[in-house]
Amino acid sequence: EMITNQMPTAELQALDAAHHVHPFTNQDELTSKGARVIMRAKGVSLFDSEGVEILDAMAGLWCVNIGYGRGELADVAARQMRELPYYNTFFQTTHVPVIALSAKLAELAPGDLNHVFFGGSGSEANDTNLRLVRTYWAEKGKPEKKVVISRKNAYHGSTMAGASLGGMSGMHAQGGLPIPDVHHIDEPNWYAEGGDMSPDEFGLQRAQELEKAILEFGEDRVAAFIAEPIQGAGGVIVAPDTYWPEIQRICDKYEILLIVDEVICGFGRTGNWFGSQTLNIRPDIMTIAKGLSSGYAPIAASILSDEVAAVIGGTEFNHGYTYSGHPVAAAVALENLRILEEEKIVETVREDTGPYLQKKWKALADHPLVGEAKIVGMMGSIALTPNKETRAAFKADVGTIGFKCREHCFANNLIMRHVGDRMVISPPLVITKDEIDTLIERATKALDLTL
Ligand code: PLP
């Protein structure tokens, strides 16, 4: 029998569970419940196999920044596929889409981040970064500078290097991670770990853990520090104001390369083109993916400073992916950037719809179940707590309450994700004020049902 859109939902679900192994999913649980089958999407809405409209407050996986259903990207992809569906840029060849996209990214990226190495995913880009920083120091005659410092509860991908750089203990536990010479310091999560300290004191203390780690390893052994401007998958953890200036000072002082993972924060999410601009960070290397193509094609990159590129340029960097700078993905990304620019989507997030969402999101802190509400641009989180005063967690069953809330959202046609006891949102940046009202109504209803 042909498998088509017309097939009954239950049959599609059974086939899915029988043959498709899902990422980050308990397959047995999925088999008993059946995955929701998503058929099509438009703007901020998904439509499932029963025709039900779902408000996607996660923009897929934090990526569909320009919203669903932009036919221009489909047209560009089809045109490029006819013209030149594939060629690589290994061994002294190139093509126009990758030239144009590299030049455009050099223009958009802050400072002297002018050189782009492409990959197919954020994980791949961070794998590139790991080999790149070690190669950089080896080229500078310091091959012993190999250690990369990251943070607990960071997310940098699912490959061996990506998951090692990441600080998710559940991921490290599977497959024998992290790989050698990767070290994790504590995260700047004041709400969960700040105790009686003020956020500013705590931010400073957590940043100074970087300095301590550098001194413990010896600065002649540390290659780089990697971090997300705002931890996304970790629960939208916004560091206290004192944190990033201190991190920047330490990286400068000890000549540690600073890799800023902009996979979520890039391309308007925080109200500027890059999270580094919002938080005043000066990266040596930036990881980008997701919003680069708004998820319409798999593409990612590392953007290197003039200095890093010059050093790497002195050797043959024995690294590359078949799909590095894929012409169709590059053309789609360029069209996505054109739309973000011409429709002033980043400015709208910064000045209009962003502040509108922020005001309503922060008001959720008045709900009896909510201990704090954080939001920058259009990435937000709320912490669920049994005790607003002490900021206590639901200790016996961390994650259970979040999962419950997430299920109430899902049943109520809102996709909001839970990370432990935090609920997070990252809607398409084109979300309108009316749609924001709907998002907040449904989120409030889910919180009421969870209470
Ligand atoms: N880095 C960050 C900050 C991410 O949020 C993600 C994905 O969520 C990645 C890297 C990995 O990207 P990918 O899933 O495209 O490999």
Image (cartoon, rainbow, N blue to C red):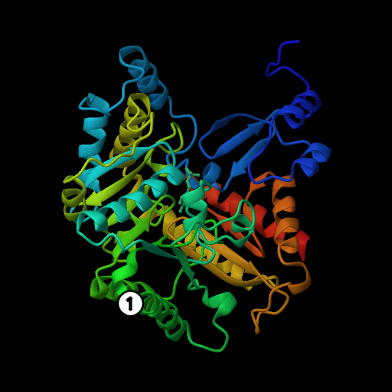
Q: How many marks?
A: 1
Frontmost residue, 22 versus 411: 22
Look at the picture and state if 203 lies above or below 255.
below
The residue carrying pointer 1 sits among few (fewer than 14), some (14 to 19) or many (20 or more) residues within 10 Å by Cα, namely: some
The answer to whether any part of residue 113 appears in the image is no
Q: Is residue 52 left or right of residue 185?
A: right
* Front-lying residue, 447 or 305: 305
Q: Is mark 1 within 8 Å of ligand 1?
A: no
Question: Where is residue 172, by image quadrant?
Answer: bottom right
- For label 1, the SS is helix
Question: With respect to residue 17, does 272 lie above or below?
Answer: below
Q: Quadrant of residue 420?
A: bottom right
Horizontally, is 2 left or right of 262 in the view? right
Q: Quadrant of the N terminus?
A: top right
Please provide percent x and percent y for residue 281.
29, 65
Left or right: residue 131 compared with residue 399 = left
Q: Residue furthest right?
A: 32
The image position of residue 184, as x and y in percent, is 48, 68
Residue 45 versus residue 238: which sits nearer the camera?
Answer: 238
Residue corresponding to mark 1: 246
Q: Residue at x 38, y 74 (%)?
A: 217
Q: What residue is shown at x 69% (from left), y 30% (from top)?
A: 20
Q: Provide residue 341's location: percent of width, then percent of height.
A: 29, 41
- Is residue 386 visible in this depiction of the protein? yes
Amino acid identity at mark 1 = Glu
- The residue nearer to you, when weighing 255 against 25, is 255
From what the image shows, is residue 99 above or below residue 408?
A: above
Q: Residue at x 39, y 62 (%)?
A: 148
Q: Indicate the quadrant containing the C terminus: top left, top right, bottom left or bottom right.
A: bottom right
